[in-house]
């Protein structure tokens, strides 16, 4: 038996699986203060006889296995979790090996192995929800370096009609500050699912997300881009984003997949729907 955790900004998904990658049991709990959430995590796993645990965690999080703070939450907008030693606490309480990566990195990995990027060697997985995060998978590995990618906090040009200052406590008007779910709600006064029939809301959202995708294409040149998360359940966003990306690239990157005839095969929704993160976390300890 293997354990898996997708630790997101809104919820923790906890699962037990096997070496074949099958999810045998799964529960969802809200992401609250760590003193509330973590004991629930430990209670779920403590009597299951799992041999290893894979954790895909919201960032920033220390994913360097040689670091003394491996698995510690860093300067997160979720302030109650800043400096919380999540990996060390789970290791101490469960006494099993734990492998840690970001929630979006493991989602990118699982989409590459089982989902919408099975036929390519590299992909980006971007989640647009409570926050914005992106993970990259290249030729068998997730992208790690000095730390992990923090693509949700890049700077974007402000929409000419946008006067909202942004929600990010660190940067205000970075991508996450202008385009994540809380920014949509605070700008327009309603949650995104209550704004579905207002074209100007989604034209502005697509403008910001397309800028980010254009930059990722320039820097990383992924063979597929997968957009998930709660905000992307507004399916009217996909054609708007695709057209904006084509317009913003303006023919500079030559690929048939960056044209109107093929871009719907390049910027896609997750093949694993909402299970990309938890399946990726399980896959961390299958190998």
Image (tube, grey):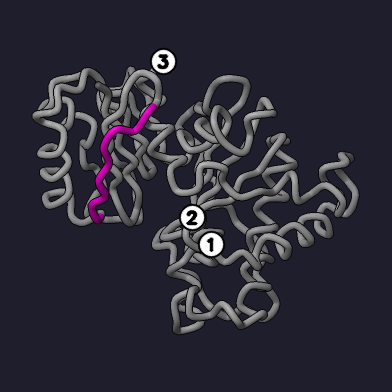
Residue 208 vertical position relative to residue 200 in the rendered view, above or below: above
Report, in whole angstroms, how far the alpha carbon at label 1 lies from the one at label 3: 32 Å
Q: Position of residue 96 (x, y in %)?
A: 18, 19
Mark 3–mark 2 CB contact (< 8 Å): no
Q: Quadrant of the C terminus?
A: top left
Q: Quadrant of the N terminus?
A: top left
Give the label, 1 or 2, closer to the camera.
1
Residue 15 vertical position relative to residue 237 in the rendered view, above or below: above
Residue 23 belongs to magenta span: yes
Q: Earlier in the sequence, mark 3 or mark 2?
A: 2
Dot 3: element: loop
| Label ID, residue 233 | 1
Q: Position of residue 281 (x, y in %)?
A: 38, 32
Mark 1–mark 2 CB contact (< 8 Å): yes
The magenta-colored residue range is 22-30
Label 2, on which residue? 229
| Label ID, residue 287 | 3
Label 1 neighbourhood size at 10 Å, few (<14), some (14-19), many (20+)?
A: some
Residue at image location 48% in from the left, 35% down from the top:
105
Q: Position of residue 178 (x, y in %)?
A: 54, 67
């Amino acid at each position: 038996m293997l354990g898996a955790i997708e630790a997101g900004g809104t919820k923790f998904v906890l699962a037990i699986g096997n070496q074949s990658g099958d999810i045998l049991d799964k529960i969802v709990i809200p992401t609250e203060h760590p003193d509330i959430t973590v004991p629930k995590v430990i209670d779920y796993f403590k009597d299951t006889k799992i041999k290893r645990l894979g954790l895909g965690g919201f960032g920033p999080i220390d994913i360097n296995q040689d670091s003394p703070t491996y698995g510690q939450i860093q300067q997160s907008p979720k302030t109650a979790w800043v400096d919380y030693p999540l990996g060390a606490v789970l290791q101490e309480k469960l006494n099993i090996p734990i492998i840690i990566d970001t929630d979006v990195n493991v989602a990118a990995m699982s989409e590459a192995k089982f989902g919408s990027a099975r036929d390519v060697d590299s992909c980006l997985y971007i989640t647009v929800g409570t926050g914005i995060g992106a993970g990259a998978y290249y030729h068998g590995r997730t992208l790690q370096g000095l730390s992990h990618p923090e693509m949700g906090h890049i700077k974007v040009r402000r929409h000419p009609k946008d006067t909202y200052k942004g929600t990010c406590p660190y940067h205000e008007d970075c991508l996450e500050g202008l385009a994540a779910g809380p920014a949509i709600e605070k700008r327009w006064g309603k949650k995104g699912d209550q704004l579905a029939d207002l074209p100007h809301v989604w034209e502005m959202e697509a403008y910001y997300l397309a800028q980010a995708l254009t930059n990722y294409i320039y820097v990383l040149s992924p063979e597929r881009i997968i957009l998930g998360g709660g905000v992307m359940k507004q399916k009217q966003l996909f054609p708007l984003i695709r057209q904006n990306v084509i317009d913003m690239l303006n023919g500079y990157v030559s690929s048939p997949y960056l044209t109107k005839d093929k871009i719907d095969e390049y910027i896609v929704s997750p093949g694993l729907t909402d299970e990309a993160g938890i399946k990726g976390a399980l896959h961390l300890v299958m190998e």
